[in-house]
Each structure stands twice: as structure tokens, then as C-alpha cells.
Amino acid sequence: MSAATTPSWDPSQYLRHAQHRARPFADLLAHVPALPRDPARIADLGCGPGNVTTQLAERWPAAHITGYDNSPEMLARTKEYAGPTAGGGRLDFAQADLTHWAPPETYDLIVSNAALQWVPGHLESFPAWLDALAPGGAFAFQVPNNIDAPLHALMRELAATARWKDLLDGVLRHEDSVHDPLVYLDRLARLGCEADVWETTYMQLLPGEDPVLDWAKGTGLRPALTALADDPEARDAFVDAYRDLLRDAYPTEPYGTVLPFRRLFVVARKAAA
């Protein structure tokens, strides 16, 4: 995996905007059809700190749900959620690199929340993941689809300037980290699935000082922060320059700062037996 896909994660920073980050997952799950088995077996790919994985237990109370993530820091935060659930199911968590994850058993639902953009070549994993679904099972995911927004474009432009290009070359995510919606629809349809693909732009109202920078520190900026971790002076200089660019791109209003955020949703259902 490239440096862009293996940032160090800060769960506390990530969870500072937990409500905005959790809402798309709830919207995704609202479109997942009935699962073929009860109790269901569910895999959550890129579960992060586990806070949204609990939504799966609320929707399917008796299910056995396993969250997978490659970040030790994130997995450490999942301990508070692990164990039996109120509906008779179970939540557990395991370390896994999604680039190489091979389903160890049959699932009724494989789901992923804002993780596949960090997985190079994730389209090539779809056949094996679908093979691991029970007949009538579902594969559902959502990813940010705003790599062209100022939030990311300004970061890449700054990283490409003379001061930073050697330190940050190839570190940040690029335009091909998420595909066009039609690419996902075509790939899943050709694999025999009934696919529902759509986009939603959330007008996220963020409070506080420099809230867009604060948002980026939890996700998109992590690769740069990781690459510059051994040089605090350079790290702080890059963050300060990026902050100034964001202030112009996302002006603060009396009621807060609006961060438009487009997300891509996919729900694919495998044919029943």
C-alpha cells in the first residue's frame, strides 16, 4: 500500500465531527433490503472506532457483526462496543488490511462506510466479496466523492509547490481514489447484481474556529500529517498554509461555516438462489 493509504489515525480527532460522519451511514442502511438469513452475518469494512458499527446492531439486533480495520488506534476504541448486543447478537472487531481482505466465511451483508477511497484497486476486490455473500445478500458502501472540491484540491496544490513536493510527493489521495458512479453501477451489474447508485451533497454546517481544517485533520489531511510527523516545524507550516487557503475557500458566516460534502452511495443485491 502507498503512503496515501496508510496514515496514522487519531480517533479523538475523527470523532470531533461524529454526527456529520455518521449520518451518511444511516442513510445508506435505510436503503439496504431485507437480508436473507436471520440472524444475519455482517462484515463492516473499515469500521474505524466502531461508533457507527453499532447502527448495524440497531437495524439487525440478532446479527453477528464483525468490524474490520487496519488502524490499531481505531481498533483500540472499539473495545467499548464489543460483546453481546441487547438484541441477542454480537459485535466483534478484527484487524484487516482491506486491500488484501479475503472473506473468511459467508455473509448476508458486507458494508463499508467512508473507507474504500483509501483502498487502491478496490474494484478488483468486488468479485471475491460478492462470492462470499449468501444468495440474496447485499453489498453496500458509501464514499466521499468530492476529491475535486477545494477541501482536497487546495491540499494537493499546496503539496505540489516547491517547498513541499519532495516531502509529500505521492502521499495524498488523487482523483482516481473514487470512481464515477457509472463505473460502480456497470461493474456490479456485470457481476450479476441489482445495483442502486446515487449521490447526495450534504451542506454540513460546522461550528467553531477553522472548522474545515478541523474536519480535514480527522480524515483527508492524515496522510500529510503522518508524512511530516518527524518534522513538527514543517508539519505546522504546512497546516498553517492550508488553513489560510481554507479560510478563503470556506468563509465563516455568523451562523457557522458551510462545508458542502458530496458522497456516493451504492447498494448492490446479489441474486437469490
Image: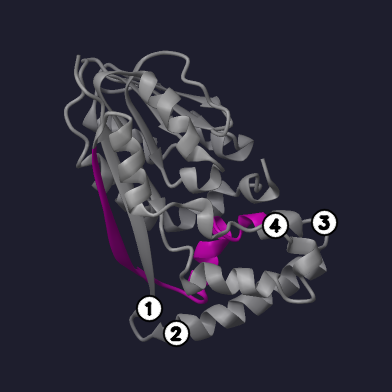
Left/right of residue 72 with respect to residue 123 in the rendered view: right
Marks 1 and 4 sit apart, C-alpha to C-alpha, by 33 Å
**Mark positioned earlier in the residue sequence (4 or 3):** 4
* Amino acid type at mark 1: Gly
| SS type, badge 3 | loop
User: How far is mark 1 from mark 3, CA to CA?
Assistant: 34 Å
Q: Which mark is residue 256?
A: 1
Looking at the image, what colour scheme do you see? one colour
Query: Separation of disc 2 and disc 1 at Cα?
Result: 9 Å
Instruction: In the displayed orientation, state which residue is furthest to the left.
Output: 34
First in residue order: circle 2 vs circle 4: 4
Q: Is residue 108 left or right of residue 231?
A: left
Return the disc, 2 or 1, that comes first in the chain's sequence.
2
Q: Quadrant of residue 260?
A: bottom left
Residue type at mark 3 is: Asp
**Mark 1 or mark 3: which comes first in sequence?**
3
**Crowd class of label 1 (few under 14; some 14 to 19; many from 20; radius 10 Å):** some
Residue that badge 2 annotates: 251
Distance from disc 4 to disc 3, alpha carbons, whole Å, reads 18 Å
Vertical placement of residue 172 versus 39, above or below? below
Q: What residue is at 37 percent from the left and 78 percent from the top?
A: 256
- Give the residues in magenta: 195-223
Q: How many marks?
A: 4
Is label 2 or label 4 in front? Answer: 4
Residue 170 is tagged as 4
Is residue 85 found inside the magenta-colored segment of the image? Answer: no
Residue at image position (16%, 27%) is 34
Mark 1 / mark 4, whichever is N-terminal: 4
Element assignment for label 1: strand
* Residue position marked by numbered label 3 in the rendering: 230
